[in-house]
Image (tube, coloured by chain):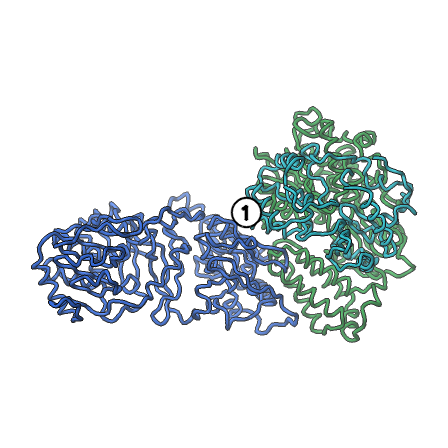
Amino acid sequence: MAYPYRDERETPMLSAHFGDPEARTLEGWRRRGGYEALRQALGMSPGEVVDMVKNSGLRGRGGAGFPTGVKWSFLRDDGRPHYLLINADESEPGAFKDRELCRWTPHQMLEGALIGAYAIRATHIYIYVRGEFFEPAQIVARAIEEAYAAGLAGPDVLGSGYGCELTLHLGAGAYICGEETALMNSLEGRRGQPRIKPPFPAVYGAFGQPTNINNVETLCAVPHIVRQGAEWYRSFGTEKSPGTKLFNMSGHLVRRGNFEFPLGFNMKELIHDVCGGIRDGRRLKAVIPGGSSVPMLGAEEIDIACDYESVAQAGSMLGTASMIVMDDRTNVVKQVRRMVDFYAHESCGQCTPCREGTQWLAKILRRIETGNGTEEDLETLVDLGKNMTGTTICVLSDSAAAPVVSSLRLFRDEYLALIRRPQPVAAMV
Amino acid sequence: MAEERTPLMGGNPGWAGEAGEFGHLSEADIRGTTYVGRRPPEGTHPGASCSYPFQVLEKQPEAPLFVGPYRQRLDKIRTRYPTAQGALLPALQLAQEVRGFISPETMAEVAAELALSPAYVRGVVTFYTMYNKRPVGDYLVQVCTNVSCNLCGGDEVFEAFLEHTATDAGEISADGRFTVMEAECLGACGFPTAVQINERYFENVTPGDVPAILERLRGESAAGPRPERGG
Amino acid sequence: MSNEQQQQLVHVTINGRALTVPPGTRIIEAAEQAGIGIAHYCYHPSLSAPAMCRMCLVEVEGAPKLAPACVTAVAPGQVILTESARAREAREGTLEFYLQNHPLDCPVCDKSGECKLQDYTHAEGPKHGRSVEPKRVLGQDDFGGDILYDGDRCIQCTRCVRYMREIAGEDLLCVVQRGHRSAIDTFYERGVEGNLWAGNIVDICPVGALLSKDFLHKARVWDLDNTSSICPNCSQGCNVKLDTRDNLVMRVRPRLNPDVNSYWICDYGRHRYEWINQQGRVEVPLVRSPGGALRAVSWQDAMLRLVAALRERSGPAIVLGSAMLGNEENGLLARLGAALGGELLFRSARAPDEVPCPGAPQLARRRDLAANVRGLELLGFRRVGDDAGTGGLPDARGATLIVLGDALEQLPAGYGADAGLFVALAQRDLPGVRAAHFVLPVTTFAEQEGTFTNYEGRVQRFWPAVQPPPLARPGWQVLGVLLAGLGEASAPASAGVAFGMLAEHHDALAGLSYEMIGPRGALINEPARIGAGRGV
């Protein structure tokens, strides 16, 4: 029951109440079974909650797909203050699921976070919402106020004796703050630059304390797991990628928006049936399956299952399952250049291969796009992409290289066409 | 706040033209403004005190910082972080809410407030795009031209805003109302083209919607102060 | 080292060389111990390591990604390769990124010759650039004080930003903007002026982005001679290098001594070197003739006459030492003073406050604004005069007045003119010394070998960096000959021998010799050494 379109094949779990304004309110959320899972979790030991999430096989929905329960188990009961951070700094081009979760079901997120905080013995949850998401943040703020008023947060959560604070923190405009250690720096009032690891956040995180950070969608799945059980959750999705996932469908589609399916759902079916295929009767050209940071796939490469393993096998990554769909009129070079411009704009500037590489790629691509490229440029692009991959603190650099290298694999002829027969770019989108 | 349940389709131009199967919802339903309600300038629960506008219509570049309700809000915010530095981003947002942009003087004042060095604060301010380093118009129009919106005409929407406000990117329009800028991905890729105008998102904007959106903003601007402060 | 500690040691292999280091040692440090240099920009041993320059990536066998050697601690059994194909390719690739926007203006860059970008590019960088794009232009910016910033050459290693925060204790620099628009800047018009430690950022800048206005376009570094020395400007005794060309000191740079100044010096000391280059020296021995005029004579003549005059002298003796000169000459002066039964005095300027270096606990610009105050006190000299280093001298009428180094400024005109015998061992030909009966040209600390004793009693050596005027002699040599002429001691043949003579009269220095004073200096009053010295 996703938004703004629904499909009968969907398995709505996280998105069951999208488009339902009443579900936002605490009262409405409770009427829909809300906070029962929190009550249940507080009756368990923290270790039992961790085990349950481990057994569910839930994997982080922020892009990396790391098992959530395992991540939680890294925090030791060492007497230091622990923090749980909610990563709602959604800024990956193509991704727009956390915004929907925040604005339609803020209590779902808070409930999941409180369960997670209890599991890792965190006493403070920071909700890092990107600054541009002012409207969703207002909704979350209201939900926080309701949660405090109802005793769901504060020194004694639901009379359990467990205390946990909720604090909303707004970002100020930086894509890189979605990287977990950059987010911590930003939360601490610093430039949002990723930190070198080790030390890992579970040992030295926000404010130097053991910290766990989860994506909004990850935490939203937690109440469902607690309420219905790990086995039930595993009944969705595949063996290695259990559960459901919000698929963020954008680009040249008839029906755009979020759709919730079990992981492993077929990509071709998703694009051509659920989303109604390509607009204006055009043909599919390429799909970026996991947000702009992952390699693109050609039209012939999309008959695959949308789970972490299958997409990786196809040469890309599921990432945030944010699919950017391009039709046959698309000027691939222009769109790749636009994405690289983005990475150049958003590079924090610490690591030289990223700081210099992103702007260099952008300069070359712009030259090719405007008909001033050479064939040697293509070699240089691939080479720079190689030198930018695996050589930096975080993966923004790798991400910038991904669309360049993958588009050169699929659409080299388009680059060559621009190089050999310069033409005005206005003819193409 | 009395919210009219205006049907989306046909009403409120340019705001969410493609509401799919949810055309029965009002703008307030989707924005959640009824739920959010009016929020007092001094903040409510400290945990929620960060969530305020920092791009209000009337800017007071000379106004004192951190007085009255703003002092109360900053005090609340400071209780939420184990370090003074932790309150830097919210404190700058408060300052921008009052003054409309972050001048060097503002940086120095915020630095003094939190016992940080001014140069450090400058480093932080310039890292983030949402701190305006220069004054902007009443309405800061940020058009997403990143890939998902770009595929669907983001560049044209951006051009349309420039044309209809008669400005160049980043400039303040002659009437002082608008500054139009290109923005990176706004996280509303399913609703191209996404445009952020001050705190609000306008979704599914096409070049044809632009005049009506600007007209709507002009109407709000004339209707009275700070329409969006109350939510 | 205890057995337990030995058991904890980590065994690793770097480029095939087996190495044993304490746990927690970072790869870059371990490699350094093995004499293997790993290229780096952002890492500096006394600053935090952000691992952002990506130059020090090395291959650790079995690891999927290359590891930054500056932050990766060694692990037992690690096999580290700094010259593997992967490590080399990564370095070469990264170097190309550094060069893409670099102006390559080495011919007009002060850093040329000691620039890490130049060095690494020469060693393994691309022979030709393949970028055809226009370069980023940021231009120059005045950072205040002595510092000029060239944004186009900057490689964003942020050493300077971290130095100002972590060592100089004032966050006066920051990175503004982000990504490829990043630049280093101050808070608008507020520069680094006023921070006494800011000058060090020029030294730690690995490229030509931070420049000293004082040194700007003054010399090419490959034309400079570098001499190890001690900063004479306060009693901290910072280890420095005097960089000279054409017999002129061109700049002063810190020299590592972890016990004294770490990698740093203050700007007060850094910029007080011009006096070494000053003209107007006493060029030849001068002796007052019966007619009253000073006449140039040979050294032999001067010394014979002076010995005779000293033998015939009467009245009290006043002996004035100099804290800007070494233990050797002051020590022999003290011997002479003792032989004459005179009072040992010195004058030296004192600053109102000590200025500690926030990030280097042992380092401060000390109140005493001369290197050898402690040495003089130890040798028996007593401080007189005010905090400006003036006044305080007793009436010299009829007395024997022997002055070493002190220019006798700010005294009533003709001070000493009524002395029975007035001997000035002087460097500069100033009115104050012109009243003497004997004006003998001596060298400055920069022109001779010697030692200073710093505030904590650390004896440190310095070496001659520039040539003195042809007839000027080190004070110890002049005084040694005098003592020999008076039959008090045999004249020392070298500064080292002169130093050895001090130990005979001063317990604190017992057992010390030039050979024993290592690169970090040696503390006085070491009981073990005193015992050993006595035993010999």
Residue C136 seen in render: yes
B199 or B21: which is nearer to us? B199
Q: Chain of mark 1?
A: B
Q: The N terminus of chain B is located in which quarter? A: top right
Left/right placement of residue A217 relative to residue B121 reads: right
Q: How many marks?
A: 1
* Amino acid type at mark 1: Ser
Residue A246's spot in the image, x, y percent? 80, 45
Choose top left, top right, bottom left or bottom right for residue A419.
bottom right
Q: Report whether A276 appears left or right of B148.
A: right
* Residue reaching furthest to the top: A159
Which residue is the site of mark 1? B117
Letter of the chain in cyan: B
Residue placed furthest toward the left: C312
Q: Is residue C58 above or below residue B62?
A: below
Image quadrant holding the C terminus of chain B, namely: top right
**Relative image position of residue C463 (x, y in whole percent):** 30, 63
**Residue A120 at least partly seen:** no
Residue A195: image location, x then y, percent: 59, 49
Which one of the lettered chains is coloured blue? C
Disc 1, SS: loop
Q: Position of residue C171 (x, y in %)?
A: 52, 49
Tell me the shade of chain A: green
Task: Residue at the far bottom: name it.
Answer: A420
The residue closer to the viewer here, C87 or B56, is B56
Q: In the depicted view, which residue is nearer to us: C433 or A145? A: C433
Going 85% across and 39% down the picture, which residue do you hit? B29
Neighbourhood count class around disc 1 (C-alpha, 10 Å): few under 14, some 14–19, many 20 upward: many
Q: Residue furthest front?
A: C413
- Quarter of the figure with residue C325: bottom left
